Structure formats: structure tokens, C-alpha cells
Amino acid sequence: MALWERRLFYYLRRLADDEQEAWDILQQTWLKVIKGIPSIREPKLFKAWLYSIARRTAADRIRELITENNHRREEPGLEELADQNNGPEDFENASLVHYGLGKLPLEQREILTLFFLEEFSLSEIAGILRLPEGTVKSRLHRARAALRTVLEREGGAR
Amino acid sequence: MSADYGKFRDNLISLEQFNPEIHQHYLEEMEKMFTQEITGVRKFGWWARDLFLFLVGLVLMSSAIFDQPISLPIAGRWLWGLSGAFTLGIALLGMRLAWKKKIDLRNDSKFIALVGSSGMTVVAFSIMFAAFIMRDLQNMTTMVPIALLAIIIGILIGLDNRVQQGELNTREKLLEIEYRLAALDERLQSGKGGKN
């Protein structure tokens, strides 16, 4: 538990309004995780499963998480996304990323947190967020661009 | 995962500071959530069961060492003695928890159920096996009821665990309902905004 506590807390803190709420969601998450562990047949799926439980638990309390999945926006074509960097290497400064995440809307903040925190693949993120892979790809692309814009703007202002 | 990425993630996580008081409260709540007090009638039941098992274990062991079943071959006698030692072990394990007055529902209850029910089944079969190879009707009439008793105790230990797991389920459902009601109440009172 201790191994995952800080990581899950970081993720949940990006979703929750305040710290107390994030701890409460984490507590509830553990309860579900402990009861559900026997149903895990593939240990390598554990990480994504853990985050999906945390996400679902958070969604019970954070209305935005439910409504954002129902939003239908015009997604860019996949060819537009072909040049995107697949790793977090272009965001090397953790302090800046942490700061930038706080400036993004929930949808982008969440997808980037999953990406930076665990280096989840598109299909794993799609499983956690219960969205099609194509949608995840475009959202991630937009979120990275938004983060870059925030960091450039802040960098210019400093 | 590369070492650089691991370092990046660790740095990212370390930037999230938390209030030690709220964290302590969370740890206490976690502890409470998975702990069950043994009080009242239940406490009495635990002590009675464990003392009984302790006596059964003592009787089985002393009889294997000192007197009957004297007609048993040496392997059967060892089996008989080990059954006694196993029963004593289960009794001492139960007594330790009754003394602590609380059970960790994550670990203790499953462990007791597993060791207790499988152990008592082994004890029962050992006694029946010993009775069978002795071919002594007088001893068999004593040993078979003891074996049946061991099976019943094993079943009771398993059932006790099911009840505890059921309580854990109920607690989870209640928490869920509580959280849903709180969220609903929050939504009714005001349109909720996102995080900073």
C-alpha cells in the first residue's frame, strides 16, 4: 500500500478539490482494491486496474469526471497527431510540470497526470478513462500542447 | 521504465506536499476501517472456543506422549501428537487475538479461517485414521465423536470468517451510500467547480 499511496494520492489530488477529499477517496479506493484483488488474474494489469478503481471511486464524488466523458468535441484527425512525442522527455522539469498541471482544466490535467505519473500506454489510459483510444490520443495531444503553452507563457512572464 | 523517468516521477510526487495532520487522520481511518473489536458476547465466545481447543490439544498431546492410544503404531502416534500440537497452535492464535481484543479484517480473519478450518479437518482425519488402524471398538467410540467435533469446530471457524467478510461488505456499501448522499447534497447546495 505504501508503495502506491503517494502515487495514487498525487493522481487523486489532481482531481479533488481539496486534500481531505483526496485522502477520503484514497481510503475508499483501498477498500475496493483489497476486496477486488483476488479477481486480478494478470499481475501486469494491476497498475491500470488500481488507477481505474481510484478513478471510479473519485467519479462517485466528483461530478465533473462523469460529465467530461460525455462531452463530444471535434477531435483532430489522427494524422495531425503523428508527430507527437510519445514520452515525457520534452517536459523534463518536474517542478514546472507540477505547476503547469495545476493551470490546466480537469480533463487535460487528469490525462497528463496518468501519462507522466505511470507512463501508461494509450490503451491503458483508454481503459482507465473508459474512452476510445483515438479520443485519448487526441486529448493527450491537446493536453500536451496546452501544458507547453502554459509553461512557455509562464516562462516568458518570469 | 528508464531511470531518468523514474527520477522525474519521484520528483513530481515529492512536489505534492500534504498536511501531516490530515494524513495522520487518514492513517487512523484506514486502521479503523480494517479493524474489528472483539467485545461482549463475541469476546466470551472466542475465549470459550479457544480454551476448549487448548484443552483438546493438551489432551491429544498428553495422550500421544504418556498413555493411550498405546496400541497405535509409531507413525500413528506421531500423527496423533501432531494433531494435538496443531490444535494447541490454533487455540493460542485465537487467544492472542482475543487478548488484543481486535482483528485485522484484511489479514487475521482470513488467516484464522484458513488455518483453523483446514487444520481442524486435518485433525479430524488424523483421529479417524488413528481410530481405524487401532481396530479397537472401545477407542473408536471415543475417537469418532472427537473427530466429528473437530470438523464442526472447523466449520464454525470458517462461518465466523464469512460473517466478518460480510460485515466488511456491508461497511463498504454503507460508506458508498454515505459518500453518494454527501455528493448529492453538495450538488444540490451549489454548482461545484473544478480544482484550482
Image: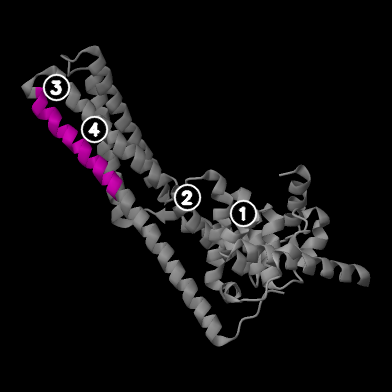
Q: Position of residue B9 (x, y in %)?
A: 74, 52
Residue A126's disc is none
SS state under label 4: helix
Disc 3: which residue: B132
Report how far apart the C-alphas of labels 1 and 2 lie in the structure. 16 Å
Please name the amino acid that badge 1 sits on: Glu
Report how far apart the C-alphas of labels 1 and 4 lie in the structure. 45 Å
Q: Residue drawn 6% across and 22% down? A: B137
On the question of residue A145 being in view, the answer is: yes
Q: Tell me which label, 1 or 2, sits earlier in the chain.
A: 1
SS state under label 2: helix
Please name the amino acid that badge 3 sits on: Phe
The answer to whether A31 appears left or right of A62 in the picture is: left
Q: Position of residue A20 (x, y in %)?
A: 62, 68
Tell me which segment is drawn in magenta: B139-159
Residue A5's disc is 1
